[in-house]
Structures are given as structure tokens and as C-alpha cells.
Image: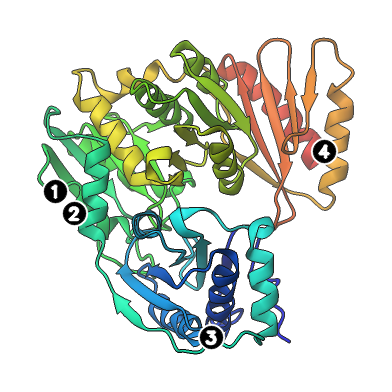
């Protein structure tokens, strides 16, 4: 029996091709996925899509072979972003599988799976079962037939749905630099943003899974450098950077300065609240505390959750939240089957900018109230011991509150706070610090890092 524990993680499949997985493994996972969705919901078909990586087409085709071997049909949406796959799953009401390794280097690939309606499948909601069945690769059920594979292009329908949620037709003309990082934004942006009062300046729109210009991971500041230079050089109003599978977006203002994903979360939350169709907004615990403050100021009810899309989506379903945001630049919308879509978040920012006359730096200043460190990783041998040491240092101090919703979060009396949490997959501790001003933030940051890295 094959062991797939190294590639089937908490949220998805991810690993090096062909060292960790190949077409035979993908075929087994496809069969297991088909069996799971039949047992889970009686599904008779699934929809797939894939990114631009060299291994994505053969892996997705092998997966489809596994699916149809279990008597389940496959609708192939073909080349697409992860949020296009979620759109297909939602609009066709089918379970889905997206072949992508997101922002990982070229030698990686993966699968993001969902139930019909883009409902997440994670370790505790089906992925462990799929792994077990794929490892066994044998089934008692006789499917009685071999499924069929058909193709369906959903890109135009995806764009139309986004346009129905955010109307950009009446905004003032804007110049927009878009860095697709040779990823799937180069496929979706030209369709979604065409025919609008936007002059799009493309950076790295050529689909190339070897990522010849920079990694398709805008969370790393090194990968924003080209966009930050291009925006003022072109006299643009805004810059947008998408990750490899284009489900995340990062925003740069007219000066070339990055806009915090927390500020984007607050801005979009205000726009969603203004629709008057709900009040609950989800935010993870490392977003700026400006997010819950601003949500409350606009009549909303902020709900704090752990980091990670499965927790956000579960809370959105439980609370019927209208919107959710993470500091990693994942943005979730009730109107998009509670799934994350960088494109829809980008359209909200474009609409907010284009509906008024101020530059983006002024517009977003109202949503950026505190100084933040960003996420800082430290390699440690014994993460629990380091966290315990930090907790012991702070928990007895007057006016300090501590919680362990996700790692260790410490609120300090002067409004500063920090979160220290271990990686699920690597020997890392991740630190986020926020404070009323930059000097205080740096002081707290340096104190914690000294303890963690001692």
C-alpha cells in the first residue's frame, strides 16, 4: 500500500513531481475522490481545472482517468485560476479539483479539492478519507459503468459573474499595472478587465510554469519589486500582483508602496456591509485590529478566527458572513460560494478607487491605523518550548491578556499585540506584531525574536 502522507496535507495535495507524486498517484487520488463524492453526496460528475505548470495537464488527465474508472463523469474546465474552478464548482453544482501548486516553485504541483458549491475539503472534512482510499486503491463498489469526459469553457461566464457583483463600467479611467508573475492572472485578467475604463499595463502575462521572472508569491516582498517600480514609472493609479493560481491579490498604491492586506480587508468589508444584506465579517487573528474596529464602526459584527481557509470558510458558513479576509491576501465572499477570489477583491479596490477622486494612498490611509511587522519566520528546534518561554515571560504582567485560539496571542496594555504560532509543516515559528506606532512595534518585535532565536 502506497504512503501518501507526505503529499496529502491539511488542506490539499502538494509535492514535487515526479519525486513525490506522479500520474499513477494522481490516478489513484482521482478514483478515491470519485468514491468519496459518491458516498458523500451521490455525485455523478466532478469538474476539474489546471494551471500553466508543465505537469498540470498530464496530472489532471490521469486524475480524470481515475474518476471515470469509478463511474463518475468529468467536466474539464481546462486552463484556469483556482477561483475559476470554485466558480465552476459553484455554478455547475459539482465537486471540483484544481491542479496547481499555487506559489510554490516550478517542480511542485498539487490538487485543491472541494465539494459541490465550492465547499472546502480538508483533513477533517474528507481529505483523510481520500488519502486512505487512494493509498489502498481498491474498492468494493461496482460502478457498473465507465464515466465520460467532456470539456466546458467557463472563463466568459466566470467574468460575467464577477461583473454582476462589482460594476466597474462607471468608474473614472484608471491606469492599472498588473503583475501576473507568469501565472494564471495572465489568462484571466485580460478577459475580466477588458471593455472597462481601465488601461492595463501587463507584467509577465506569458503563462510559464518555470516562473522565469520571479516566484509567483507576492507575499514575499522580493517578488513585488518589479511592480513597485513599474507603477510610478508608468504614472499608474494602482498596481495588482497575483500569485501563481491567482486566488490571492496584493495591491500597490500610486507611489509604489504596498497596501496592507488588512487595509484591503477593511475596505472591502465596508463595501460589502454597505449593501445591507448582512453584518458578519470574518477576519483571522493576525489581521490588524483596525479590521474589527472599522467593521463595528460601519454597523458590522466582526468574528475572529484561526489562520487558514478551512477555518474561515467554516465560520462563514456557520455565521452566514458576507465577507472574510486574511492577512495573507485571501479574500472570501458569500456571493462567491464563500470561496476565496483575488480577482473579486481586486475589482472592489478598483471600484473604490474609481468611484472617487483621491489617489489610492489617501483612500487606504483611513484603513491603516497601526504599525505592523508582517509575518517573520524563525527556524527553531523546539517550537513548543520557545512558545512556552514567551508565554511565561508575559502572562504574569499586569494588564496583559493571553489566548491560544491559534498559537499564542498576547495583548499588551498599550494596545500592542503579537501572535506566535508554529508552522504545521516546517520547524518554524511565525511571528506577527502590531503596535500603535513603528517604534513600539519594533521594540516588541525585537524582544520576541530575541527570545525565540536565543
The span from disc 2 to disc 4 (Cα, nearest Å) is 47 Å
Q: CA distance from mark 2 to mark 3?
A: 39 Å
Which of the marked residues, 2 or 3, is nearer the chain's N terminus?
3
**Residue under the point 39% across and 41% down:** 250
Residue 206 in the image: above or below residue 166: below
Q: Nearer the viewer, residue 284 or 357?
A: 284
Q: Nearer the viewer, residue 161 or 37?
A: 37
Secondary structure beneath disc 3? loop
Q: Nearer the viewer, residue 372 or 163?
A: 163
Residue, disc 2? 191
Q: Which residue is mark 3?
A: 143
| Residue 74 x, y percent position in the rendering | 39, 76
Label 1 vs label 3, nearer the camera: 3
Q: Secondary structure at mark 2?
A: helix
At numbered mark 1, what does the secondary structure look like: helix, strand or loop? Answer: loop
Query: Which residue is labeled 4 in the image?
Result: 387
Give the secondary structure at mark 4: helix
Q: Position of residue 189 (x, y in %)?
A: 24, 52
CB-based contact (under 8 Å), mark 2 and mark 4: no
> Which disc is residue 194 wearing?
1
Q: Earlier in the sequence, mark 1 or mark 3?
A: 3
Which of the two discs, 1 and 4, sits closer to the camera? 1
| Residue 450 occupies quadrant | top right
Q: Is residue 124 visible?
A: yes
Mark 2 touches mark 3? (CB < 8 Å) = no
Is there a contact, CB below 8 Å, between mark 1 and mark 3? no
**First along the sequence among labels 1 and 4:** 1
Horizontal side of residue 212 vs 441, given as left or right: left
Q: Nearer the viewer, residue 213 or 289?
A: 289
Amino acid at each position: 500500500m502506497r504512503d501518501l502522507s507526505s503529499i496529502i496535507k491539511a488542506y490539499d495535495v502538494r509535492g514535487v513531481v515526479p519525486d513525490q507524486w506522479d500520474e499513477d498517484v494522481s490516478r489513484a487520488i482521482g478514483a478515491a475522490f470519485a468514491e468519496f463524492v459518491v458516498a458523500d453526496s451521490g455525485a455523478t460528475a466532478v469538474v476539474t481545472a489546471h494551471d500553466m505548470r508543465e505537469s498540470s495537464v498530464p496530472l489532471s488527465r490521469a486524475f480524470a482517468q481515475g474518476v471515470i474508472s469509478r463511474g463518475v463523469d468529468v467536466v474539464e474546465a481546462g486552463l484556469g485560476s483556482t477561483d475559476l474552478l470554485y466558480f465552476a464548482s459553484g455554478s455547475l453544482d459539482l465537486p471540483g479539483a484544481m491542479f496547481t501548486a499555487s506559489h510554490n516553485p516550478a517542480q511542485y504541483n498539487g490538487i485543491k479539492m472541494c465539494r459541490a458549491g465550492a465547499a472546502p475539503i480538508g483533513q477533517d472534512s474528507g481529505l483523510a478519507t481520500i488519502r486512505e482510499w487512494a493509498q489502498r486503491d481498491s474498492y468494493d463498489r461496482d460502478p457498473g459503468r465507465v464515466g465520460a469526459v467532456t470539456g466546458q469553457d467557463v472563463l466568459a461566464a466566470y467574468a460575467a459573474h464577477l461583473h454582476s457583483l462589482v460594476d466597474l463600467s462607471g468608474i473614472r479611467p484608471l491606469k492599472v499595472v498588473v503583475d501576473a508573475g507568469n501565472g494564471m492572472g495572465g489568462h484571466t485578467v485580460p478577459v475580466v478587465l477588458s471593455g472597462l475604463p481601465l488601461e492595463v499595463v501587463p507584467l509577465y502575462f506569458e503563462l510559464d510554469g518555470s516562473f522565469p521572472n520571479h516566484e509567483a508569491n507576492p507575499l514575499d516582498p522580493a517578488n513585488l519589486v518589479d511592480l513597485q517600480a513599474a507603477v510610478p514609472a508608468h504614472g499608474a493609479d494602482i498596481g495588482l500582483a497575483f500569485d501563481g493560481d491567482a486566488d490571492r491579490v496584493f495591491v500597490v498604491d500610486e507611489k509604489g508602496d504596498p497596501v496592507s492586506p488588512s487595509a484591503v480587508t477593511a475596505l472591502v468589508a465596508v463595501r460589502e456591509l454597505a449593501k445591507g444584506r448582512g453584518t458578519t465579517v470574518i477576519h483571522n487573528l493576525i489581521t490588524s485590529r483596525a479590521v474589527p474596529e472599522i467593521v463595528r464602526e460601519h454597523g458590522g459584527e466582526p468574528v475572529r478566527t484561526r489562520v487558514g481557509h478551512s477555518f474561515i470558510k467554516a465560520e462563514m458558513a456557520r455565521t452566514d458572513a458576507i465577507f472574510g479576509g486574511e492577512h495573507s491576501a485571501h479574500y472570501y465572499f458569500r456571493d462567491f460560494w464563500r470561496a476565496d477570489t483575488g480577482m473579486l477583491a481586486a475589482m472592489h479596490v478598483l471600484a473604490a478607487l474609481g468611484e472617487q477622486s483621491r489617489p489610492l494612498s489617501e483612500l487606504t490611509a483611513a484603513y491603516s491605523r497601526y504599525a505592523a511587522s508582517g509575518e517573520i519566520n524563525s527556524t527553531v528546534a523546539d517550537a513548543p518550548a520557545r512558545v512556552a518561554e514567551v508565554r511565561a515571560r508575559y502572562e504574569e504582567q499586569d494588564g496583559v491578556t493571553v489566548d491560544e485560539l491559534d498559537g499564542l496571542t498576547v495583548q499588551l496594555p498599550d494596545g500592542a499585540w503579537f501572535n506566535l504560532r508554529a508552522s504545521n509543516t516546517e520547524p518554524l515559528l511565525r511571528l506577527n506584531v502590531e503596535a500603535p506606532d513603528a517604534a513600539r512595534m519594533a521594540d516588541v518585535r525585537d524582544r520576541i525574536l530575541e527570545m525565540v532565536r536565543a
